[in-house]
Amino acid sequence: MEIFDLGIAWDNESDNEFVNDLNARALKVGVRPYLIHAYNFFSSLKNITEGELTFRCFLDRSSDDTSTFGGLADFLKQKDINFINHPDNVKNSIDKSKIHSMFVSYGLPIPKTVFIKPQEEKQVLEAKIQHISVPCVVKSAFSSCSEDTALAINSLVDALRLMGEEEDKSYFAQEQVASINLENKPAWFKVLYCFGEIILCRWHPMTGEREMLSLRQIYRLGLHEIWPITKKVKQACKLDFFSTDIVMKEKGKFLVVDYVNDRPDMRKKSKFKDALPDEIVDKVINSIISFIKN
C-alpha cells in the first residue's frame, strides 16, 4: 500500500492555484501530497478501494453536488483517514438549522433569524418575516456559504413570491445587518481560522475587496474581541479550517453573520481583485503544512 501524507480533492477551477501552491509547498518541505481531480478520480477511487492507496490526512475541497465527487468524503471516512474538516462536522455546518442551534448554545452574537420550511402556511410565513422585519436576507437553509447566493427581500410580497417559486426548498432569513464605519470603511470582516491561526480581513460588502489587518490596526480599531468570538465559533462548528463574517454593528458590539464557510475562498488578490491578499493564502498553506508535519 502506498501512503501519502496529504490527499487533496478539488473540482472547482477557482481552487487550481491554491491546490498547486499547497502541493508545491508540501513537496518543498518533504510532505508527500496526492491530488485527486476529475482526470484521475476513478483510478484513485479504485486504488483506494483495493487497498493500494491511502492518506494520513485528507483535505476535501470538492462539492457533494457534483456527480463525480458526490459521496467521496463519506467513502473516505470509512477508511480510517484523518480529515481537515471531518465530513460529519461539515454536514452540521452546512445545515443552517443545526449550526444555528450550536451558535445559540455557545452564546454567539447572531442576527435575528427564522427558518422557513417548504410549503409553509402564509400566516406562519408572514409572522416569521415580520419578526425579523424587512428588508432582510434570505439564503438556502442547507448549503455551503461558498455555493449559495443571498437574496435581498425588501417586502413581505417578495418573500411570499420567493416561497411560491421554490416550494420544496428550505430557507433561513436574517435581519439585514448594517455595519458602522471605521476610518471611513465598513466595519465588516472576513475572519479565517486555520488550525488555531486567526486572520482578520477587512471586507467591503459593495466591492468585495479584502484587506489584511495588522496587529496594530486590530487594537487601534477595537477589534480584538473578534479573536475570542472566532474561538467560540470554532468550538461550535468543530471545523479545523473555515471562514466567518463578523460585523461591528455598534461600537464594541459584534454580530456573526451567515455562520461558517467550510471551504473558504482561497483565490489570490494578485490575480483577482476581490480575492484574499496573497500573504494570507500563503499563511493558510503554511498552517496546513505545519499541521501535517506535526
Image (spheres, rainbow, N blue to C red):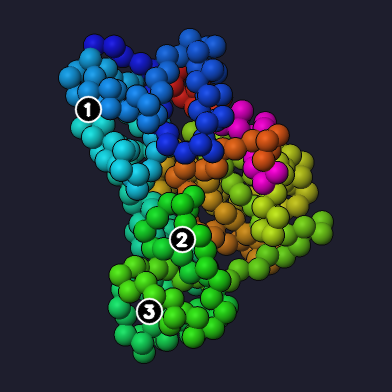
Residue 76: image location, x then y, percent: 26, 31
Residue at position x 70%, y 34% in the image: 270
Q: Are marks 1 and 2 in contact (CB under 8 Å)?
A: no
**In terms of image quadrants, where is residue 67?**
top left
Q: Earlier in the sequence, mark 1 or mark 2?
A: 1
Magenta stretch holds residue 258 = no
**Which quarter of the image is occupied by the N terminus?**
top left
Q: Amino acid at mark 2?
A: Gly
Residue at position x 29%, y 23% in the image: 44
- Mark 2 surroundings: few (<14), some (14-19) or many (≥20) residues within 10 A: few
Which residue in the protein does label 2 denote?
A: 107
**Which quarter of the image is occupied by the C terminus?**
top left
Q: Is residue 204 left or right of residue 96?
A: right
Q: Is residue 232 visible?
A: no
Residue 275: image location, x then y, percent: 64, 42
Residue ranking furthest to the left: 50
Mark 1 and mark 2: span between their CA atoms? 36 Å
Residue 134: image location, x then y, percent: 55, 80
Which residue in the protein does label 1 denote?
A: 79
Mark 2 and mark 3: span between their CA atoms? 34 Å
Residue at position x 67%, y 31% in the image: 279
Residues drawn in magenta: 273-284
Which element is circle 1 on?
loop
Which element is circle 3 on?
helix
Magenta stretch holds residue 280 = yes
Q: Amino acid at mark 1?
A: Lys
| In this rendering, the label closer to the viewer, 1 or 3 | 3
Report the front residue among 37 and 96.
Answer: 37
Which residue in the protein does label 3 denote?
A: 164
